Image (cartoon, coloured by chain):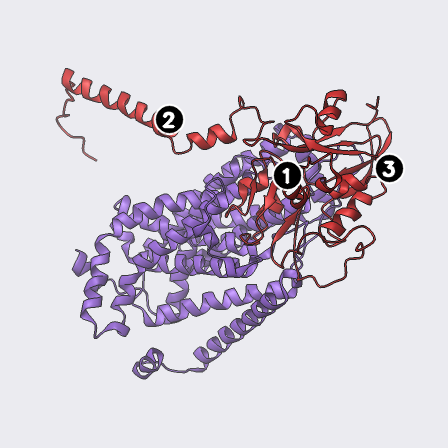
Amino acid sequence: MKRPKTKARVKLTRRDFTKIAATAVGSSVAAYLVTTGPLSPFSNLKRQQISPDEDTHTPTGVHHWGMAIDLNKCIGCEYCLRACSAVNDVAPDKPWNIVVEDRTANGQRFYFSRPCLHCQHAPCVEVCPVKATYVREDGLVIMDYDRCIGCRYCEVACPFDARKFNWEPRAEENEFVPTWGVPEVERRPRGVVEKCTFCVHRIDAALERGQTPGEAREATPACVNVCPVGARTFGDLNDPNSPVSEVLARYPTIRLRDELGTEGSVYYIPVGEEA
Amino acid sequence: MASITLRKRRFEFTPGTLSWFALIGLLLLIGLTSAVIVFKEGLVVTNLSNGVPWGLWITIDLSSIALGAGAFTLSAVVYIFGIKRFRSIIRLAVLVGVTGYTSALLTLVIDIGRPDRFWHPWVYWNIHSVLWEITWCITLYLTIMLVEFAPVIAESRLFKDRPGLRRFGHQLHKVAPVLAVAGLLISLLHQSSLGATYGIIKARPIWFKPSMPIMFIVSAIAVGPAVTMAAAYILEWVSGKRIIAHDLLRTIARFSGLALLVYAYIKFWDLLAVTYYGATPGSERAFRTLSLFSAYGFWFWVGEVFFGLLVPVLIFLMPRFNRRPVLLVFGALSAAAGILINRWNITVSGLIVPVSYSPGIEYVLPAQAYSPALVEWGVALGVVGYIFLVFTLATRFLPIFETSDESKVVG
């Protein structure tokens, strides 16, 4: 390669400098506005979904339905699983509620049960490509079975294994009906994902009648009603006088995998914390 | 019908072509039967479960999209970076792309629980979902590729008597640079997002890392063009005509080799960070489960690293190897196998390690297990048959390699 004989000297006039500087500043400002600033198409979304300042305990609505589960009281009888499976007509081998035996680090045995935690920043809701699942104003994470395409991404994303896919059409008898309750909702069709609803059909109907979920039995989830030892308490987390708020005020509680920031609506009274 | 008029012109049924078409027919029959069984009986006929809801079919989707990446890479090379000598392979690259993307869509429709609602992502938007964004990108990019490919179809003998259509086809050539820019952006986005599909799942420690989208896009850019290169050689062997200059194909192979080195570098640091320097209890537990309950380690080192990286890098970059077409094709197939195994490893391994959420220390879900059912393999064979069919028909009836016409018009 031959080197060019005369190197073109770059002359930078004041005018050029001003232009370059103005362009640089201008584009930086524009970039800021469009990416993180007020012009960003995502700024609203971010404020809603990832702002740490926001009080995440308060959904946009008046109510926020939540539950407290006392791990000291639970005796592992699985009544909650059965009543839930009967009332919501869930396949008994794919329950919405699970009950398992577990042990604390210092060897204390306890029973652990888990409905859907109804996360306010639910990973399942964030990944759904069609908004077939969403967080309602009252904090409930609900499925739209008419919209779900059955891609199962929510099932993959849920940290709590709380979602179940309908692999086949269901025609079997529900072994828990009628002993543990009668179905109050339709069976879900083949090919969609289903989950615990906190018995939303009871809550919505009861509110119209003027009853208070968590207090009136017909307005309260089946699992809470059936529990023989009163391990589960339900109610409005926004109402300081609701049964669940009173439990939360009295006992120290934890939420499952709180470090993920999913902001679940189910609180656990850990083992050894009973009054 | 069109095929009858074409058959009159030139179509010899030699024993070779006959048995080839018989093979394609058989594969399609198997695939179709499997698909009908799945649609009729539901996904219960697969070995997928609530523990492992994604399996072989998702692996096929991810792989065929990654292997179709030659289309956007080579289009960018020609139309954005202005390296015109690669123009002769663009049509083939786009054909590989179209085939890969349509295979992915076909498999997806069988994989979702409600195929009748396949159109929902286009109507019901969740802009926060990477899967929604991927669906849109794939749709848009497939459209772009079809527009890019339209002139080829317009030039075919099918439309010999339709000069208007041909002129329209040539007009489309003029927007090729615009399509290439749009295709590049959209491809960078969704090829990465396919990795992000796993990388953003904070519940699963071996997925949750920012390197996921980067490794997906880099591996796609590396292997996609190599697959196109292999397709060119194979077509040359089948047709007996030298179609695309060998030095061009060797340049593509060298590019692939270098890109694979970049991929290897990122993979190396990813491995080191996740399993050694930055190991967390979650990831350690996950890898322990994998080594106990799966052959993950074997497939990682032999499939992904040896066949997916080492073999193709050596073949593509060493002058004594990359002058031999047979070795180049072998290298490309080896790299493609590496992609397939990598996508399988990521999907299935991430799922057989169960999520952990109990407040206690004893209860853990059992390690999950998955190996595809016969019907899943059947659908996979059907996809292979579809790929063979599209390739055979396109290369036989479409002017994939006749660029003289185009170059006169476009200049």
Say which quadrant the N terminus of chain B sits in. Answer: bottom left
Picture colour for chain B: purple
Q: Can the viewer see residue B301 in this picture? A: no
Q: Residue at x 35, y 45 (%)?
A: B184
* Cα distance between the residues tagged 3 and 2: 53 Å
Give whichever of B145, B122 is nearer the camera.
B122
Question: Does the rendering let one see residue B238?
Answer: yes
Q: Residues within 10 Å of mark 1 (few under 14, many from 20)?
A: few
User: Looking at numbered disc 1 in the image, what kind of residue is underneath it?
Assistant: Leu
Q: How many marks?
A: 3
Residue shown at 84% from the left, 24% from the top: A272
Q: Which is more toward the observer, A112 or B54?
A: A112
Q: Position of residue A155 (x, y in %)?
A: 62, 46
Q: Which residue is mark 1?
A: A207
Quadrant location of the C terminus of chain B in the rendered image: bottom left
Residue under circle 3? A75
Vertical placement of residue B130 versus A30, above or below: below
Q: Which residue is mark 2?
A: A38
Q: Which chain is red in the picture?
A: A
Q: Say few, some or many: other residues with alpha carbon within 10 Å of mark 2 (under 14 / 14 to 19 / 20 or more).
A: few
Q: Answer left or right for B34 relative to B362.
A: left
Q: Quadrant of residue A66?
A: top right
Q: Chain of mark 1?
A: A
Subunit of mark 3?
Answer: A
The alpha-carbon separation of the residues under discs 1 and 2 comes to 39 Å
